Amino acid sequence: MAAELILVVDDTPANLRLAEFLLKGAGFTVHTASGADELRSVLAKVRPVLILMDLQLPGVDGFTLTRQLRADPETRDVRIVAMTAYAMTGDEARARDAGCDDYLAKPIDPITFAGTVRRYLRPVAR
Amino acid sequence: MASGSTSPRVTSPSRSSWRSLRWRLPLLVSGLIVAMLATFLFASYEQVKSAVLTAGTERAKVTAGQLVDMLGPGLRRLTGDLHRISADPAIAQFVATRAETPLDPVESHLRPLVSNGSQVIELWTMTGDRILQMAVPNAAAVALPSGAAPSFTGVRLVETPAHVVAFEGIDQVTPPGAPQPIGYLLVRRNVSTSSNPDALSRLMGGGARVMLGGDPKSPWTDLSHLLVRPTAEQVRDGALEWQTTAGDWRVGAVSNISGTPWQVAVDFPRAAILAPADRYLRRMLLVGLLFMLVAVVAGRLTMARVTKPLADLTNASEALAADAGASPLAPGADEIGRIGAAFTSLGERSSRLAAENQEVRTASRLKSEFLANMSHELRTPLNAVIGFSTILQQEAADLTPELRAEFVGHILTSGRHLLELINDVLDLSKVEAGKLEFVPEPIDLERVIGEVLAVVSSTAASKRISTVMTVDRAIGDVTLDAGRLKQVLYNYVSNALKFTPDGGRVTIRATPEGADRFRVEVEDNGVGIAAADMDRLFVEFQQLDAGAAKHHAGTGLGLALTKRLVEAQGGSVGATSVLGKGSVFHAVLPTHATAGAAPQLMVTPLAGAGRGPAILVIEDDPNDRKHLVEVLLAAGFVVEAAATGSDAIARCEQRAFDAVTLDLLLPDQSGLDLIPEIRRRGRNPDVPIVVVTVVAEEQALAGHVVTDILPKPVRADALLASLRRAHVTASQPGRIMVVDDDESAVRLASVALQSAGFSVEGHTDPVVGLAAADGHPPAAIVVDLLMPGLDGFQFIEELRALPSNRTTPVIVWTAKELTPAEHRRLSESARLVLQKGRGRADTLVSHLRLMLAPRVGV
């Protein structure tokens, strides 16, 4: 079984590195992007099964990016999970409104992180 | 069914409606007054009228009575005489015989009737023949109309053509035993003399008259010659009120003349008698009208006083209810005025409350946003800290040393970022609460900027960014809080470095701005800022897309904090930018800040006599003088400087120096001449003198005892070596004691201070530190406030109780936020309070340097 391709979008280098390390350690193929431009160039090359999307990004934020991805027929069906430090009441609803399939608040638990991500990859009725 | 129309909830104020109290009240009051006045007038007029009429008729009755008394006796006697004579048989016989000539007996019978010559006596037969007429000289003869005799009966008054009122008595002559009368006896007498119109007029008023009559069916005769007569039914005993044929109303009285068929009537015009009552009525009406006028005016005024404020109050209430903002009501001393005033202040309070409410809501919203942002900003670095430290804890053994180092690096970076964030937030909240203290002190702009550039030098070097500083001397002296200025500059410069590509350039420029301000600009040739983003620059948590975000994770608070720091000092900030070319951030600040927000602890250099050997530098060239002073200060000497010989002499007379450096070429005198003067005058007979000169003039110096001769430019080591040879050596900058229960803080301070040349003695136990200080007082003590056992406050108090340490300078170095009371408590015992934080001790070092620097008398 080929390693599933996951794209992590985060503007904080340390957090990007953390997710990358944890996911690679769990056997996933990981691509990273620190902003909208990088995301587009990565998506031009590969087609991830899951995008872990930071919502607070400089310039075009994660909400907008998610909406754009959902509007694009090419990326409409990609699983998108918000991985964000927005952890106040209502933030999850905002993420889901933008089109995220699920929501993961920072700080993440490094021990359960890979398992949680794997759970997101199970087929769900959309 | 649906009545969907919505009526306006607030009706517009009807300012002049008749239904408003303002009109209704005066009208109501005026109406009441008019009704009361009318009732009163009507009642009183009726009363007066009736009284006047009663009085008039009474008067008429009295007059009539008097007339009756006057006329009565004569008329009664005449009537009696007439009856007696007509019943006399002789008269009957005379009538029956129709004698042509009067008989004596008849004449003698009739004689009593003829009392004077003003009357006529006639005897008539039943057939109408006059058989006797006795002439009356002044009265015209009146013939009885033929055939009319039977209607003659009784007595009557007649008016003669000469307007003489006469009494006419007629009686039937009936012989005794005869069934029918056989003739008539007629007597006519003038009675007009008995009435006196003038007297009557005086008595009764104008228009009064007297009438005499008897049978109601027979005519009455107006004794005052007025030819009007009352009708029968109007004549009655007592009061008389009747209308003449001409339509005039008259009032009067009628009185019977007893023993005769006649009555006397006295009357006068009703209008005349009612004149006083009418006058009274007119006067009352006038008074009433006046009253009403006064009442209406007074009512209007009262209403104006009462209802005008009420109307205003109503309008204001409606305006307030409609959120239209009430205009202030006129204040007044009475209740209404007070209501108005109270309402005005209520209105003001209401709008103030509304404004405050809006502010509170805005503040609350901003706080929520701030909290949400803080949550986000804290979680972001915590994610890395927790994530990587968990990995390190769980799988340390499986990680390569490189990975371990990388992860620890991430943790450290994130931890520092968190600390920076917290410091910024604290500073921001302090500025917001107005609690941030500013300690203005004279500063050297060039030095301050230089220090900032030194802090960022490694960052700049790693990106090969050149930093340039230009300070315009025209700015003059600057008195500002150096720490805060550095914070502002650091924020600008570190931002500039972040956004400037490798190999770029960052320029700091300071220029004067008006008379008492200066401008500091930080220019970079980085990516620039889009015009749309300029507004968000100085707003909290607004990080712009710089296209290189991953290289610089700022807190998002730096510029917001900068703005507040500058504004709190009375300055302003701003930025200009050209996308792709670079940005210029600026701050305009007053050159002399006025006040700090908290009690200030000023740094004052120690009055350092005795803190090191004192050297007098005598040098007229400013550059050389500055150089010598700096060299000596750096070496730990106390330095004074003089530019002229006379100044030097004056200083030498003031104190003893441990050494003197002397330039031989002085403006006012030769250095050679100065040597003996220094030795002779004042307190320096044996002072070592080091001659500093351009040309070695050893020959000229023959005969003078000098320690050394050094050529210009003087090298520091040569100068110090000369002084050493003269046994003049400076002590070390000083031993600093650091007392802090946090061992890492002690270590941080120690490393920083030692690298600055201080010797450091660190203690984590304040009690031990106290004992050590007592045994060997240090040059200065740096103490933390929050320590277990003995806290900083107690430490300083106990230290001051030691005779050995009464004046040892103490710097409080703490992370605690001081209350004003604590500030006051420390201001007496501590030299300075410095905030810990940012993982550095450079502020501490610079303050200690300044504090322990020997006094420079330049």
Image: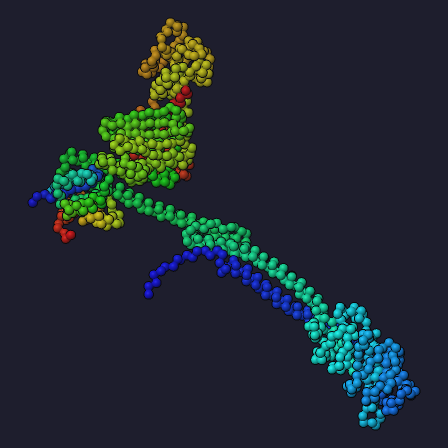
**Residue furthest to the left:** A1
Q: Position of residue A20 (x, y in %)?
A: 16, 40
Count all numbered tags in the image, as a single digit. Answer: 0
Residue B317 visible, this orientation: yes
Q: Is residue B715 left or right of residue B654?
A: left
Q: Is residue B1 left or right of residue B82?
A: left
Examine the rendered structure and indicate whether residue B97 appears above or below residue B60. Answer: below
The N terminus of chain B, quarter of image: bottom left
Q: Is B284 in front, or is B543?
A: B284
Q: Position of residue B721 (x, y in %)?
A: 32, 14
Q: Is residue A93 left or right of residue B63?
A: left
The C terminus of chain B, quarter of image: top left
Q: Residue at x 41, y 53 (%)?
A: B322
Residue B62 visible, this orientation: no
**Residue furthest to the right:** B104
Q: Is residue B545 left or right of residue B166?
A: left
Quarter of the image where one finds residue B431: top left
Quarter of the image where one finds residue B453: top left
Q: Is B283 in front, or is B308?
A: B283
Q: Position of residue B520 (x, y in %)?
A: 34, 29
Q: Is B382 in front, or is B467?
A: B467
Q: Residue at x 75, y 77 (%)?
A: B254
Examine the rendered structure and indicate whether residue B795 appears above or below residue B245. Answer: above
Q: Position of residue B94 (x, y in %)?
A: 88, 89
Examine the rendered structure and indicate whether residue B186 appears above or below residue A67. Answer: below
Q: Residue at x 79, y 85 (%)?
A: B146
Q: Is A39 in front, or is B814?
A: A39
Q: Residue at x 41, y 56 (%)?
A: B10
Render colour scheme: rainbow
